[in-house]
Image: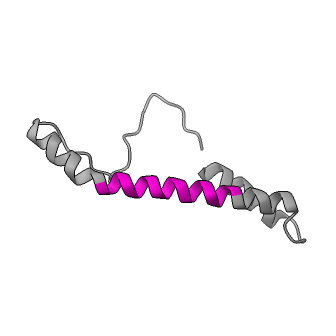
Amino acid sequence: MQGNIATLYTEVTRGDAAPTAAQLSASETAQRSLTGLLSTWQQLQADLPALNTRLRAAKLAPIRAELPPPRNLNAADED
């Protein structure tokens, strides 16, 4: 999603004219997709405390959503 939005932003800001109909349509599609993703993320965040309680009861580490994912040092950087 982030890559799609970045590409769209680059396309829209590249020209001096108003966005094309295709660019406007793509931005509306991206907005709908992002809204759905954010809704799912908020539900996951709401369910996380109960899941972490169950994980701790099972002597497992809790999920810490505030931490970045571990970096795979064997993978090539995408930047």
- In the picture, measured across the screen, residue 76 lies left or right of residue 73, that is right
Of the 4 image quadrants, the one containing the C terminus is top right
Above or below, 10 against 4 in this view is below
Residue 71 shown left or right of residue 12 in the figure:
left
Residue at 22% across, 45% down: 51
Q: Give how far across and how far down residue 28 sits, in percent.
A: 71, 61
Q: Main secondary structure of the magenta part?
A: helix
| Residue at the top extreme of this rendering | 74
- Tell me which segment is drawn in magenta: 29-46
Q: Residue at x 84, y 67 (%)?
A: 19
In the displayed structure image, the side of residue 24 where residue 69 appears, left or right: left
Closer to us: 35 or 16: 35
Taking the magenta stretch, the answer to whether it contains residue 30 is yes
Q: Is residue 41 left or right of residue 21?
A: left
Count of numbered tags: 0
Q: Which corner quadrant of the image does residue 73 belong to?
A: top left
Q: Is residue 10 above or below residue 57?
A: below
Return the x and y of residue 60 as percentages of the image width and height.
15, 37
Residue name at image x 31 percent, y 57 percent: 46
Q: Residue at x 62, y 58 (%)?
A: 32
Q: Where is residue 61 drawn, in percent x and y?
A: 18, 40
Q: Residue 67, image x and y in percent? A: 33, 52
The answer to whether residue 73 is magenta is: no
